[in-house]
Amino acid sequence: MSYELHDYVAMVADSHRTGAYARALQRMVRADSVVLDLGTGFGFFAVLAARLGARHVYAIDPNDAIALGPELARENGVSDRVTFLRGDSRDIVLPEVANLLVEDVRGVLPFHADRVRILLDARARLLTADARMVAVRDRLFAAPLRARREWAEDQAVLRGGAFGVNLGVVARRSADGWRRARIKPDQLLFDAAPLGCVELATVESPNFEGIASWTVPVATRVDGFTVWFEAELAEGERFSTAPGREQAAHGGTYFALREPLDVSPGDDLRFHFVGTQSGSDYAWSWDAAWRRGADAAWAQGPRQSTIASALLSARGVDALSREHQPRLGQTGLRLQRAAALMNGRRESQDIADALAAAPDCGFRDAAAAFQWLLRALRDLEDGAIAK
């Protein structure tokens, strides 16, 4: 997921989340602090840490929003103590290691994109062995859910068809999708249960597996489950994405069951949830099991997975395999040629002209090559941002 400027603004404006981070930083930043801000966005936490007295802050983000950072730092009088670096932190070498880490590279769940791998690299290369972290752990919770009326209506259309068109193939594929949504407290059928915990100082695997269980208090119909997290920060600060008035900007989730499940008081209910990183994204899988009393056998629902709902071509599925043998396509050839031409002396227009003249790059003219090059330079150029 690529964030837009308004996404970063919404996160900063979320006083529940940002207030917890700010209070933790206020207690942790010292005069000798060298701070690493991963996923800095436009640099809010980086500038705040500098204003709180940090000796220096290194702020990293591949997103173009970081271009606002130097100006933000100048306006706040800390430009001499904040260095902004655009790019993937795993490709960046700092002039010194940091002793304090601040990051919120989460998405709707703590396991988001390459967050864990980025943390592993930062712990190995960019932080001192005794570095402190503002984010300490993320606790995951789950609760059975009643679907919103519009969601149920969507499913009814898929099962019954529309205007004489049988939508069975769409229904089968969409049943294993998940929704990102603002979950309302009245959608929860009963109390949340713990699903697992991520210790950010020691986590080693980007994958996750957890089980939440309940003894059913009232007769009801379960349409699916919601999963959220509570972020525990240093100095006892925390914020939560739980449904409710103070739900953080990250939002909530809805993992539907293919068929609603009717449960009765005293039944045992179990939700099994797995996140597996594939490339720089996650595949989620889940199932529900239930039994009518402690001595009864468990009835197992179908195993569902977002892989089943992903709209992948056969080539797209093959590309997810570790045995896949990739070869350069046209975009790869363009990038290869552009990188070879970039020597710090050749001007962008000259590079574009050379690309347009290469038949295997497939540009209709130099103008099209130049427009493509402007986009490609975001990934190819040096990530340093001028102060």
Image: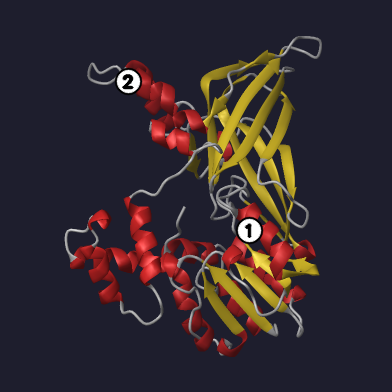
Q: Position of residue 216 (x, y in %)?
A: 71, 23
Q: What element carries label 1?
A: helix
How packed is label 2: few (under 14 Cα within 10 Å), some, or many (20 or more)?
A: some
Q: Which of 66 and 196 is in front in this view?
A: 66
Q: In this view, does 21 lie above or below 224?
A: below
Q: Where is residue 139 in the image (x, y as percent from the top left)?
A: 72, 47
Q: Position of residue 150 (x, y in %)?
A: 40, 32
Real-space CA distance between mark 1 and mark 2, rounded to the nearest whole angstrom: 41 Å
Q: Which of 90 and 333 is in front in this view?
A: 333
Q: Mark 1 points at which residue?
A: 118
Could you tell whether 3 is left or right of 353 in the image? right
Could you tell whether 351 is left or right of 385 in the image? left
Q: Which residue is drawn at 39% across and 68% down?
A: 340
Q: Residue at x 54, y 64 (%)?
A: 88
Q: Quadrant of residue 349?
A: bottom left
Q: Which of marks 1 and 2 is nearer the N terminus?
A: 1
Q: Which of 117 and 41 is in front in this view?
A: 117
As drawn, the residue found furthest toward the top would be 296
Q: Is mark 2 on a helix, strand or loop?
A: loop
Q: Is residue 39 above or below residue 282?
A: below
Q: Nearer the viewer, residue 28 or 154?
A: 28
Q: Quadrant of residue 337?
A: bottom left
Q: Position of residue 56 (x, y in %)?
A: 66, 83
Task: Give the numbered dot on residue 167.
Answer: 2
Could you tell whether 44 is left or right of 30 in the image? left
- Answer whether residue 24 is visible to the viewer in this image: no
- Answer whether residue 60 is visible to the viewer in this image: yes
